[in-house]
Image (tube, coloured by chain):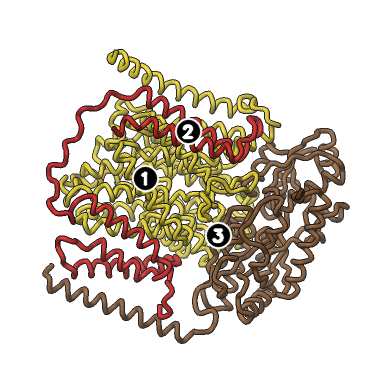
Chain colours: A red, B yellow, C brown
């Protein structure tokens, strides 16, 4: 199904890019404008997308066997882990400037180290504290990167 | 013999205790920031620049250049171990280096990267010593038209970067070019394709893009494999490259050094481009190109040699013309100017201690780096034995810090997460990120030079073929395109015929 | 590792973290006065250029007086307005300041060339530090030996090309005003900084260009590049033999500057403190030598004088742009 849509999706992307850069201004052939190269890139994507549609490889039948070892519990399933990790990364970006490097990093790392099925808190706590201390020393103290301090007055 | 005499004089300068110490500090910091993804030599050097104000000019430039070429050594480490390029020039190393690590051959991969870097660094230095002036004169022959054609040549190498479908590689390249054009236009200063986001006015950052496409997406993929990862089950075999590895790598290292050195002289991303060129070249020349992408040691040796030789090449325009070919060299130029020195055509005769001292220190530094890096291999390989549920949060943390530190901007973290997700999706449907990265690096150079060349020629497209260097580049790229497309078309035809 | 050990070690680490917190709190309480932490100095150029070097030298000197780190951060792009906007939209607490040329500080004058999301109303001038020095330069073996020759060359070759930094820069302004005064046609080729203009001149790809003086000094010494004129008003003390464009009789919006700016609303006492410190630095022989060595003129003006000269410059530039037809015609 995905394979069938592959070419058309790219053609669609190419059309959007071309239309957008055309509106930005392509200029003339001997005096390219702001959108000229982007327009060309869009046309190129349309062209290759068309090729992909035409020369579609015969459907590969040897699909990977479905994961036999499907996890029994939701907390261990791939979609959950993926969403959970992405959510933590987004949380990091959202709260970094607000809460500062040390607190945000500690919270996010604890979340990442924490194993929902194990329910142990001591090792994740240790690991995240150590990582925060270590990276803080290396980046802030030694390499003098400016990590955000956050809005808390005592920090 | 005067060169030998000058070099001995240089060693006299470089081996003074203070300068030796500066060299050590430089290469040590360089290795560290090379290993840490995100923080590149530019960031570290601009932070440490004020610290060099108090040093002698020689010590300052010795230390700063140590950071630069040291970073090229360390940059391959994370590419090989966890598929995150330590800096942009190590993107290519991910392709085969990471596969080698998955096969339990992280040791030889890291080893050949270190030895290749050492050999290339030394070859590059010899070139820097012997041919600085003629090469600098050659480099200024590259005007906008020549650059445009060179970038076309670079793009035609895309064909060799994929080990799957060529069409998909081309699609990724098209997307990469478009992404690279986001942000301010050079001619009018107008912002374009920014989706109304101020964070995109500067364009999409290379580092967040690369770390997202490679690092984050790799972690996300691995999370799906329950518990143990493949690397853990495969036994780590030898730590250093064996005879067979050396036999395979010798020529790639030599060729990579040459290509890297020459491309390093030209302004604009020399090290990054040269690593791609070297990879493509090795695949083209190889008798078994199908091994590439599946852990071919040539694919590590060549590009790693190339990016190190490029660092030596980059010193040429700086020392002989006073023109910095990349941002790192611009920082070195700055350091010298703050000390009241002006690199330029007269520098080598007026301040021999700077030129020869720096060159000699780079020989010393390369030896130091080899000594520093070889024992580290044992430690790095052990990193892979860490259970993945402990390793992956740390990988993510380094990516997050790296993305943030590029310009102290949270926006770059969002960009990285987005490209992590995109990269994850692409890998699921068998698209490779390397062509996108190459196109992303070449895109802006392609556009600027195209437009400058056409303004200079009053819109006459013929300039690209009437300038000899440009014509040669275009001819070679057309040749490469045709020679790689023909077998592809033949194969397709047979497929179609079978169908009907 | 046994569970007991893990708890013991984590307890220890937590203690260490707590200690770090306490220590830094104590440190902060003692230094409530400005500045009590690192100051960010935004430079709207990529690292390595003249302005960047000047700003870094200034940052280093300010650090000595203020006893806190002054971190130079490069925010290049958008004809310097990205860096300008970074300061204009920053919290006005004195911890984000910028080292700006006119393009980043009075963007509303340049609406013909680009639009910026802020104006000079969003910035508070602190003090003027220096004057950037651009040149008109040609290749060392070029038959062009003076601005007059260049004009003759352009008369014979209509549409002669000049390599410039972008259409809002001094180089472009001068080029356009010479073209208008002499009634010749010059075409501008925008380059991405001196590091691209200088090789283009050396390689003969453009007949002339307007690189910054410091970018060509060493090549001038080696006779590979000739400087026809400096784009400033009075002769520079570090280049007494090179005529200025004003001496040669071209009218020109004088008084380009490099200065320190803070976000609007920054408390007066902070502005005053910064101004005092910069004033002291500008008198340091060591700092002056460093800046002159880079081919930039040191020229200090305090907050009041600087505000006045910015306004004069703005007016002069607006008149100039109008005379030259470089304004958007509203219909």
Q: Residue furthest bottom?
A: C30
The chain ID associated with circle 2 is B
Q: Which mark is residue A140?
A: none
Q: Do circles 1 and 2 both sit on a common chain? A: yes
Q: CA distance from mark 1 to mark 3?
A: 29 Å
Q: Earlier in the sequence, mark 1 or mark 2?
A: 2
Q: Which mark is residue C74?
A: 3
Q: CA distance from mark 1 to mark 2?
A: 22 Å
The chain ID associated with circle 1 is B
State left or right for residue A131 relative to residue B155. left
Residue tagged 2? B155
Secondary structure at numbered mark 1: helix
The chain ID associated with circle 3 is C
A5 w.r.t. C302: above or below: above
Marks 1, 3: nearer the viewer: 1
Secondary structure at numbered mark 3: strand
Q: CA distance from mark 2 to mark 3?
A: 30 Å
Residue tagged 1? B422
Residue A79 location (% of width, % of height): 24, 50
Image quarter hosting the C terminus of chain A = bottom left
C52 w.r.t. C175: above or below: below
Q: Residue furthest front?
A: C331
Secondary structure at numbered mark 2: helix
Q: How many residues crowd mark 3 within 10 Å: few (<14), some (14–19), many (20+)?
A: some
């Amino acid at each position: 199904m995905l394979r069938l849509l592959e070419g058309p999706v790219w053609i669609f992307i190419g059309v959007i890019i071309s239309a957008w850069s055309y509106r930005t201004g392509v200029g003339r052939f001997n005096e390219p404008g702001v959108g000229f190269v982007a327009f060309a890139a869009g046309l190129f994507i349309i062209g290759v997308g068309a090729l992909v549609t035409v020369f579609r490889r015969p459907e590969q039948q040897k699909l990977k066997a479905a994961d036999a070892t499907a996890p029994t519990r939701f907390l261990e399933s791939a979609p959950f882990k993926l969403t959970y990790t992405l959510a933590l990364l987004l949380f990091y970006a959202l709260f970094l400037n607000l809460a500062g490097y040390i607190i945000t990093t500690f919270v996010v790392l604890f979340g990442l180290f924490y194993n929902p099925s194990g329910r142990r808190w001591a090792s994740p706590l240790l690991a995240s504290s150590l990582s925060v201390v270590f990276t803080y020393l290396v980046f802030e103290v030694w390499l003098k990167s400016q990590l955000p301090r956050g809005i808390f007055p005592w920090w | 013999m005067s060169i030998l005499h000058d070099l001995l004089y240089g060693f006299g300068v470089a081996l003074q205790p203070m300068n030796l110490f500066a060299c050590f500090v430089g290469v040590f910091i360089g290795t560290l920031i090379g290993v840490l993804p995100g923080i590149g030599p530019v960031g570290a050097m601009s932070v440490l620049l004020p610290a060099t104000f108090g040093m002698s000019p020689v010590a300052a430039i010795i230390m700063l250049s140590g950071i630069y070429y040291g970073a090229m050594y360390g940059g391959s480490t994370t590419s090989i171990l966890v598929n995150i390029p330590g800096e942009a020039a190590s993107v290519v190393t991910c392709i085969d280096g990471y596969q080698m690590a998955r096969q339990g051959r992280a040791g030889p991969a890291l080893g050949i990267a270190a030895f290749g870097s050492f050999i290339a660094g030394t070859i590059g230095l010899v070139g820097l010593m012997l041919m600085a002036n003629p090469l600098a004169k050659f480099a200024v022959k590259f005007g906008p038209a020549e650059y445009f054609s060179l970038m076309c040549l670079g793009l035609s190498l895309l064909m060799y970067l994929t080990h799957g479908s060529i069409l998909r590689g081309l699609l990724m390249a098209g997307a990469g070019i478009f992404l690279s054009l986001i942000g301010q236009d050079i001619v009018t200063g107008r912002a374009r394709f920014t989706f109304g986001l101020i964070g995109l006015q500067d364009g999409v950052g290379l580092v967040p893009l690369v770390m997202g496409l490679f690092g984050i997406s790799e972690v996300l993929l691995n999370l799906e494999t329950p518990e143990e990862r493949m690397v853990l089950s495969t036994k780590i075999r030898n730590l250093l490259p064996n005879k067979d590895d050396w036999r395979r790598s010798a020529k790639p290292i030599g060729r990579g050094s040459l290509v890297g050195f020459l491309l390093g002289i030209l302004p604009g991303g020399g090290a990054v481009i040269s690593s791609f060129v070297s990879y493509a070249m090795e695949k083209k020349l190889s008798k078994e190109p199908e091994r590439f992408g599946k852990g071919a040691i040539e694919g590590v040796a060549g590009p790693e040699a190339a990016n190190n030789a490029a660092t030596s090449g980059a010193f040429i325009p700086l020392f002989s013309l006073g023109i910095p070919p990349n941002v790192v060299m611009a920082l070195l130029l700055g350091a010298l100017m703050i000390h009241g020195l002006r690199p330029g055509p007269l520098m080598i005769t007026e301040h021999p201690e700077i030129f020869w001292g720096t060159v000699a220190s780079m020989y010393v530094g390369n030896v130091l780096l080899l000594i520093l890096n070889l024992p580290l291999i044992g430690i790095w390989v052990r990193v892979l034995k860490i259970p993945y549920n402990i390793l992956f949060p740390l990988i993510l943390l380094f990516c997050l810090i790296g993305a943030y530190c590029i310009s102290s901007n949270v926006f770059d973290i969002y960009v990285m997460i987005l490209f992590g997700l995109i990269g994850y999706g692409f890998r699921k449907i068998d698209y490779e990120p390397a062509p996108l990265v190459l196109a992303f690096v070449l895109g802006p150079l392609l556009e600027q030079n195209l437009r400058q060349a056409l303004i200079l020629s009053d819109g006459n497209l013929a300039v690209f073929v009437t300038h000899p260097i440009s014509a040669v580049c275009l001819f070679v790229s057309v040749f490469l395109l045709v020679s790689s497309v023909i077998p592809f078309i033949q194969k397709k035809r047979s497929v179609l015929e079978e169908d009907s | 590792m046994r569970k007991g050990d893990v708890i013991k070690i984590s307890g220890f680490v937590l203690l260490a973290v707590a200690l770090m917190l306490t220590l830094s709190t104590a440190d902060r309480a003692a230094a409530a006065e400005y500045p009590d932490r690192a100051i960010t100095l935004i430079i709207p150029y990529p690292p390595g250029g003249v302005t960047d070097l000047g700003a870094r030298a200034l940052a280093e000197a300010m650090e000595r007086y203020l006893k806190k780190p002054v971190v130079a951060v490069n925010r290049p792009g958008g004809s310097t307005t990205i860096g300008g906007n970074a300061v204009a939209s920053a919290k006005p607490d004195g911890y984000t300041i910028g080292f700006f040329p006119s393009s980043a500080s009075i963007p509303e004058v340049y609406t013909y060339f680009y639009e910026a999301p802020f104006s000079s109303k969003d910035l508070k001038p602190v003090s003027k530090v220096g004057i950037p020095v651009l040149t008109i330069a040609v290749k060392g073996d070029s038959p062009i030996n003076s601005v007059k020759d260049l004009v003759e060359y352009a008369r014979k070759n209509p549409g002669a090309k000049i390599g410039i930094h972008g259409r809002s820069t001094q180089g472009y302004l001068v080029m356009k005003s010479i073209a208008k005064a002499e009634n010749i046609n010059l075409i501008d080729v925008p380059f991405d900084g001196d590091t691209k203009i200088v090789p283009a001149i050396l390689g003969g790809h453009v007949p002339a260009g307007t690189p910054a003086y410091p970018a060509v000094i060493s090549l001038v010494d080696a006779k590979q590049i000739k400087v026809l004129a400096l784009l400033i008003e009075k002769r520079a003390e570090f280049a007494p033999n090179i005529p200025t464009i004003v001496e040669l009789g071209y009218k020109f919006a004088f008084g380009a500057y490099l200065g320190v700016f803070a976000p609007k609303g920054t408390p007066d006492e902070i502005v005053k403190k910064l101004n005092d410190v910069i004033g002291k630095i500008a008198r340091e022989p060591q700092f002056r030598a460093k800046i002159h060595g880079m081919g930039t003129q040191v020229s200090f003006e305090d907050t009041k004088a600087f505000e006045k000269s910015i306004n004069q410059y703005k007016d002069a530039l607006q008149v100039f742009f109008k005379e030259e037809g470089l304004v958007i015609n509203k219909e």
